[in-house]
Image (cartoon, rainbow, N blue to C red):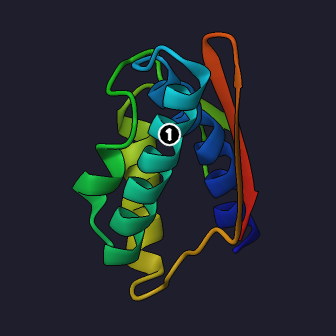
Amino acid sequence: MRALLRTTLCLAAVLSIAAASFASTPAEKIAAANALEKQFLTAFNKGDLDAVMATYWKSPDLVFIDLGGMGVRGWDAPKADWREALQGLAGAKLEITESHNTAFGETVLGWGRR
């Protein structure tokens, strides 16, 4: 579960950064990051791999902290990790009780607690 938490917290930052690139004002960037975080949580709680992956940047340049804590590049490694995690945690529900997204120029940094 620690690996999942670590990955989830890293994911919040990645999702926030991705969401920020499509918005123009700091408030819009934060709103986009919040919406993407909610989209991820809904997908995770349904155990929907494709919906989880829809919250990621689909690029070979994607950098992902895998469930073992190692950084990997590309699209396939995160998808394989999430497939394994969702199968192993069937029925698990994830809730972020404390979520923070803060805009810094072109980027939004997100973090939270489960």
- Picture coordinates of residue 59 (x, y %)? 35, 20
Above or below residue 19? Residue 70 is below
- Name which quarter of the figure residue 101 lies in: top right
Of residues 64 and 55, the one drawn nearer to the viewer in this rendering: 55
Question: Which amino acid is tagged 1?
Answer: Ala
Q: Quadrant of the N terminus?
A: bottom right
Instruction: Name the element at disc 1.
Output: helix
For the point 60% across and 22% down, the residue is 26
Q: Left or right of 5: which side holds 77?
A: left
**What residue is disc 1 on?**
31
- The number of discs equals 1
Q: Residue at x 37, y 43 (%)?
A: 55
- Name which quarter of the figure residue 71 lies in: top right
Is 27 on the left-hand or right-hand side of 97? left
Name above or below for residue 5 compared with residue 50. Answer: below
Q: Position of residue 38 (x, y in %)?
A: 44, 58
Question: Residue 100, how many percent across, how many down?
Answer: 72, 48
Depth check, front residue: 113 or 58: 113
Instruction: Specify the quadrant that holds the C terminus.
Output: bottom right
- The residue at 48%/85% (across/down) is 92
Q: Is residue 76 left or right of residue 93?
A: left
Q: Can I make out residue 73 in this image?
A: no
The residue lying furthest to the left in this view is 50
Q: Count neighbours of disc 1 (C-alpha within 10 A) and say few if under 14, some if 14 to 19, many if 20 or more.
A: some
Q: Front-most of 103 and 60?
A: 103
The x and y percentages for residue 102 are 72, 33
Can the viewer see residue 39? Answer: yes
| 57 to 42, vertically: above or below | above
